[in-house]
Amino acid sequence: QSVLTQPPSASGTPGQRVTISCSGSSSNIGSNTVNWYQQLPGTAPKLLIYSNNQRPSGVPDRFSGSKSGTSASLAISGLQSEDEADYYCAAWDDSLNGLFGGGTKLTVL
Amino acid sequence: EVQLVQSGAEVKKPGESLKISCKGSGYSFTSYWIGWVRQMPGKGLEWMGIIYPGDSDTRYSPSFQGQVTISADKSISTAYLQWSSLKASDTAMYYCARSATAMVYGDAFDIWGQGTMVTVSS
Protein backbone atom coordinates (compact mmCIF):
# COMPACT_ATOMS: atom_id res chain seq x y z
CA GLN A 1 0.00 0.00 0.00
CA SER A 2 1.43 3.37 -1.05
CA VAL A 3 2.09 6.16 1.41
CA LEU A 4 0.61 8.57 -1.14
CA THR A 5 -3.04 7.72 -1.75
CA GLN A 6 -4.67 8.09 -5.15
CA PRO A 7 -8.03 6.85 -6.40
CA PRO A 8 -7.44 3.72 -8.49
CA SER A 9 -9.58 4.97 -11.34
CA ALA A 10 -11.10 8.08 -12.88
CA SER A 11 -13.07 8.70 -16.02
CA GLY A 12 -14.53 11.41 -18.18
CA THR A 13 -15.90 12.13 -21.61
CA PRO A 14 -14.04 14.10 -24.28
CA GLY A 15 -13.99 17.80 -23.50
CA GLN A 16 -14.70 17.32 -19.80
CA ARG A 17 -12.51 18.38 -16.90
CA VAL A 18 -11.29 15.67 -14.55
CA THR A 19 -9.26 15.85 -11.38
CA ILE A 20 -7.10 13.25 -9.70
CA SER A 21 -6.25 13.58 -6.03
CA CYS A 22 -3.17 12.56 -4.10
CA SER A 23 -3.23 12.47 -0.33
CA GLY A 24 -0.16 12.28 1.86
CA SER A 25 1.04 13.51 5.23
CA SER A 26 3.02 16.27 6.90
CA SER A 27 6.25 14.33 6.37
CA ASN A 28 5.92 14.10 2.59
CA ILE A 29 3.48 16.30 0.66
CA GLY A 30 3.10 18.62 3.61
CA SER A 31 6.78 19.56 3.55
CA ASN A 32 7.92 18.82 -0.01
CA THR A 33 6.82 19.54 -3.55
CA VAL A 34 4.68 17.20 -5.63
CA ASN A 35 5.35 15.92 -9.12
CA TRP A 36 3.01 14.13 -11.50
CA TYR A 37 3.83 11.53 -14.15
CA GLN A 38 1.81 10.22 -17.05
CA GLN A 39 2.34 6.66 -18.23
CA LEU A 40 0.74 5.78 -21.55
CA PRO A 41 0.13 2.07 -22.13
CA GLY A 42 3.35 0.18 -22.77
CA THR A 43 5.62 3.18 -22.37
CA ALA A 44 7.92 4.71 -19.78
CA PRO A 45 6.53 7.35 -17.43
CA LYS A 46 6.74 10.99 -18.53
CA LEU A 47 7.04 14.03 -16.29
CA LEU A 48 3.80 15.99 -16.49
CA ILE A 49 3.92 18.46 -13.59
CA TYR A 50 6.81 19.35 -11.29
CA SER A 51 7.13 21.52 -8.19
CA ASN A 52 3.36 21.27 -7.54
CA ASN A 53 2.19 23.29 -10.53
CA GLN A 54 4.92 23.72 -13.14
CA ARG A 55 4.64 22.24 -16.61
CA PRO A 56 7.74 21.04 -18.46
CA SER A 57 8.20 22.38 -21.96
CA GLY A 58 5.89 20.60 -24.37
CA VAL A 59 3.18 19.65 -21.87
CA PRO A 60 -0.15 21.21 -22.91
CA ASP A 61 -1.66 23.81 -20.60
CA ARG A 62 -4.72 21.55 -20.32
CA PHE A 63 -2.75 19.87 -17.54
CA SER A 64 -2.43 21.71 -14.23
CA GLY A 65 -1.39 20.85 -10.71
CA SER A 66 -2.08 22.25 -7.28
CA LYS A 67 -1.20 21.51 -3.70
CA SER A 68 -2.83 22.40 -0.41
CA GLY A 69 -1.54 21.17 2.92
CA THR A 70 -0.97 17.43 2.71
CA SER A 71 -2.89 16.88 -0.53
CA ALA A 72 -2.32 17.60 -4.19
CA SER A 73 -4.43 17.44 -7.32
CA LEU A 74 -3.90 17.03 -11.03
CA ALA A 75 -6.52 18.58 -13.28
CA ILE A 76 -7.00 17.81 -16.94
CA SER A 77 -9.31 20.11 -18.88
CA GLY A 78 -10.62 19.56 -22.39
CA LEU A 79 -10.15 15.82 -21.98
CA GLN A 80 -8.91 14.02 -25.08
CA SER A 81 -8.79 10.36 -26.00
CA GLU A 82 -4.98 10.44 -25.96
CA ASP A 83 -5.08 11.38 -22.27
CA GLU A 84 -6.11 7.83 -21.44
CA ALA A 85 -3.21 6.66 -19.28
CA ASP A 86 -2.05 5.94 -15.76
CA TYR A 87 -1.19 8.98 -13.65
CA TYR A 88 1.13 8.93 -10.65
CA CYS A 89 1.81 11.55 -8.04
CA ALA A 90 5.24 11.59 -6.43
CA ALA A 91 6.94 13.36 -3.57
CA TRP A 92 9.93 13.02 -1.29
CA ASP A 93 9.64 12.37 2.40
CA ASP A 94 11.58 13.98 5.19
CA SER A 95 13.90 10.96 5.30
CA LEU A 96 14.91 11.82 1.73
CA ASN A 97 13.19 8.77 0.24
CA GLY A 98 11.22 9.01 -2.97
CA LEU A 99 7.54 8.11 -2.89
CA PHE A 100 5.00 7.36 -5.59
CA GLY A 101 1.26 7.19 -5.29
CA GLY A 102 -0.47 3.97 -6.25
CA GLY A 103 -1.51 5.38 -9.59
CA THR A 104 -4.84 6.34 -11.15
CA LYS A 105 -6.06 4.79 -14.36
CA LEU A 106 -7.84 7.43 -16.41
CA THR A 107 -10.44 6.21 -18.88
CA VAL A 108 -11.84 8.47 -21.59
CA LEU A 109 -15.36 7.28 -22.23
CA GLU B 1 19.54 14.89 -27.38
CA VAL B 2 19.43 14.06 -23.68
CA GLN B 3 18.61 10.41 -23.21
CA LEU B 4 18.99 7.35 -21.04
CA VAL B 5 19.32 4.03 -22.84
CA GLN B 6 18.85 0.86 -20.84
CA SER B 7 20.11 -2.64 -21.51
CA GLY B 8 17.85 -5.26 -23.00
CA ALA B 9 15.35 -7.66 -21.51
CA GLU B 10 16.67 -10.46 -19.31
CA VAL B 11 15.35 -13.93 -18.48
CA LYS B 12 16.99 -15.49 -15.46
CA LYS B 13 16.52 -18.38 -13.03
CA PRO B 14 16.00 -17.95 -9.29
CA GLY B 15 19.31 -17.65 -7.48
CA GLU B 16 21.18 -16.20 -10.46
CA SER B 17 22.88 -12.81 -10.40
CA LEU B 18 22.14 -9.92 -12.73
CA LYS B 19 23.39 -6.43 -13.52
CA ILE B 20 21.37 -4.13 -15.78
CA SER B 21 22.59 -0.83 -17.12
CA CYS B 22 21.47 2.68 -17.95
CA LYS B 23 23.68 4.81 -20.21
CA GLY B 24 23.29 8.56 -20.23
CA SER B 25 24.14 10.81 -23.14
CA GLY B 26 23.68 14.40 -24.23
CA TYR B 27 24.37 15.92 -20.81
CA SER B 28 26.94 15.98 -18.00
CA PHE B 29 26.37 12.50 -16.57
CA THR B 30 28.28 13.22 -13.37
CA SER B 31 26.11 16.20 -12.41
CA TYR B 32 22.64 14.67 -12.19
CA TRP B 33 21.22 12.11 -9.78
CA ILE B 34 20.01 8.88 -11.45
CA GLY B 35 17.18 6.95 -9.82
CA TRP B 36 15.84 3.43 -10.30
CA VAL B 37 12.13 2.63 -10.31
CA ARG B 38 10.44 -0.78 -10.25
CA GLN B 39 7.12 -1.59 -11.86
CA MET B 40 5.84 -5.10 -11.23
CA PRO B 41 3.44 -6.53 -13.83
CA GLY B 42 0.16 -4.64 -13.74
CA LYS B 43 1.26 -2.60 -10.72
CA GLY B 44 2.40 0.91 -9.90
CA LEU B 45 5.76 2.63 -9.68
CA GLU B 46 8.10 2.04 -6.74
CA TRP B 47 11.15 4.17 -5.93
CA MET B 48 14.13 1.89 -5.31
CA GLY B 49 17.07 4.18 -4.83
CA ILE B 50 19.26 6.82 -6.37
CA ILE B 51 22.91 7.55 -7.13
CA TYR B 52 24.97 10.65 -7.83
CA PRO B 53 27.50 9.53 -10.44
CA GLY B 54 29.85 12.38 -9.60
CA ASP B 55 30.87 10.81 -6.30
CA SER B 56 28.76 7.59 -6.21
CA ASP B 57 26.73 8.84 -3.22
CA THR B 58 23.88 6.30 -3.09
CA ARG B 59 20.61 6.18 -1.17
CA TYR B 60 18.18 3.27 -1.00
CA SER B 61 14.51 2.96 -0.22
CA PRO B 62 14.11 0.97 3.03
CA SER B 63 12.10 -1.54 1.00
CA PHE B 64 15.06 -2.26 -1.29
CA GLN B 65 18.03 -1.75 1.05
CA GLY B 66 20.06 -4.95 1.05
CA GLN B 67 18.08 -6.42 -1.83
CA VAL B 68 19.83 -4.63 -4.71
CA THR B 69 23.00 -2.66 -5.35
CA ILE B 70 23.10 0.59 -7.29
CA SER B 71 26.39 1.72 -8.79
CA ALA B 72 27.78 3.92 -11.54
CA ASP B 73 30.83 4.12 -13.78
CA LYS B 74 31.24 7.78 -14.68
CA SER B 75 33.98 6.99 -17.19
CA ILE B 76 31.37 5.43 -19.45
CA SER B 77 28.34 7.46 -18.26
CA THR B 78 26.52 4.36 -17.07
CA ALA B 79 24.52 3.53 -13.97
CA TYR B 80 23.78 -0.01 -12.85
CA LEU B 81 21.27 -1.98 -10.84
CA GLN B 82 22.32 -5.41 -9.69
CA TRP B 83 21.10 -8.45 -7.82
CA SER B 84 23.26 -11.15 -6.29
CA SER B 85 20.50 -13.75 -6.03
CA LEU B 86 17.30 -13.19 -7.98
CA LYS B 87 13.86 -14.28 -6.80
CA ALA B 88 10.71 -14.82 -8.79
CA SER B 89 9.29 -11.73 -7.07
CA ASP B 90 11.99 -9.62 -8.79
CA THR B 91 10.11 -10.09 -12.07
CA ALA B 92 9.32 -6.54 -13.15
CA MET B 93 10.09 -3.67 -15.47
CA TYR B 94 12.92 -1.53 -14.17
CA TYR B 95 13.33 2.10 -15.19
CA CYS B 96 16.20 4.48 -14.65
CA ALA B 97 15.43 8.18 -14.56
CA ARG B 98 17.38 11.43 -14.26
CA SER B 99 16.77 14.19 -11.77
CA ALA B 100 15.68 17.36 -13.51
CA THR B 101 18.17 19.77 -11.95
CA ALA B 102 21.94 19.36 -11.79
CA MET B 103 23.26 18.46 -8.36
CA VAL B 104 19.82 18.71 -6.74
CA TYR B 105 18.65 15.77 -4.65
CA GLY B 106 14.92 15.35 -4.29
CA ASP B 107 13.97 16.73 -7.67
CA ALA B 108 11.50 15.43 -10.26
CA PHE B 109 12.65 12.84 -12.80
CA ASP B 110 12.57 14.52 -16.19
CA ILE B 111 14.28 11.96 -18.42
CA TRP B 112 13.44 8.26 -18.28
CA GLY B 113 15.02 5.22 -19.84
CA GLN B 114 12.90 2.92 -21.95
CA GLY B 115 12.86 0.26 -19.25
CA THR B 116 14.44 -3.17 -18.83
CA MET B 117 12.13 -6.14 -18.34
CA VAL B 118 13.54 -8.72 -15.95
CA THR B 119 11.84 -12.10 -15.83
CA VAL B 120 12.87 -14.58 -13.15
CA SER B 121 11.48 -18.06 -13.65
CA SER B 122 12.60 -21.61 -13.14
Image: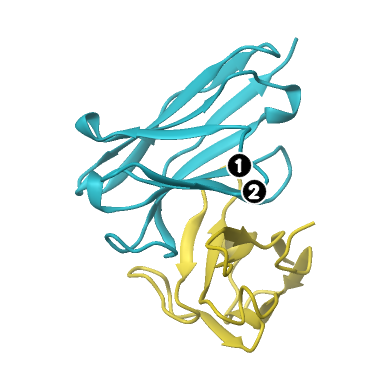
Q: What residue type is labelled 1?
A: Arg
Chain at numbered mark 2? B
Instruction: Using a 10 Å C-alpha cutoff, classify the residue at mark 1 as few (fewer than 14 neighbours), some (14 to 19) or many (20 or more).
Output: many
Snapshot colouring: by chain
Which mark is drawn over residue A98? none
Q: Give me the C-alpha separation between circle 1 and circle 2.
A: 14 Å
Is A44 located above or below residue A5 in the figure?
above
Disc 2 secondary structure class: loop
Query: Residue B33: where, in percent of width, then height?
Result: 36, 52
> Mark 1 or mark 2, which has the lower sequence index?
1
Which mark is drawn over residue B38? 1
Q: Nearer the viewer, residue B44 or A38?
A: B44
Q: In this view, does A91 lie to the left or right of B73?
A: right
Q: Is residue A16 visible?
A: no
Q: Which of A43 and A50 is in front in this view?
A: A50
Instruction: Using a 10 Å C-alpha cutoff, classify the residue at mark 2 as few (fewer than 14 neighbours), some (14 to 19) or many (20 or more).
Output: few
Query: Residue A41: where, in percent of width, then height?
Result: 61, 47
Instruction: Identify which residue is drawn at 70% across, 67% down.
Output: A4
Is B93 located above or below residue B63 in the figure?
above
From the rendered image, report the letter of the chain displayed in cyan.
B
Q: What residue type is labelled 2?
A: Pro
Query: Residue B79: where, in percent of width, then height?
Result: 37, 35
Q: Point out the frontmost of discs 1 and 2.
A: 2
Residue that protrudes farthest toward the bottom in the picture: A68
Q: Mark 2 points at which residue?
A: B62
Is B74 located above or below residue A46 in the figure?
above
The picture's colour for chain A is yellow
Disc 1 secondary structure class: strand
Query: Residue A54: where, in percent of width, then height?
Result: 42, 79
Q: Can residue B14 be seen in this view?
A: yes
Chain at numbered mark 1? B
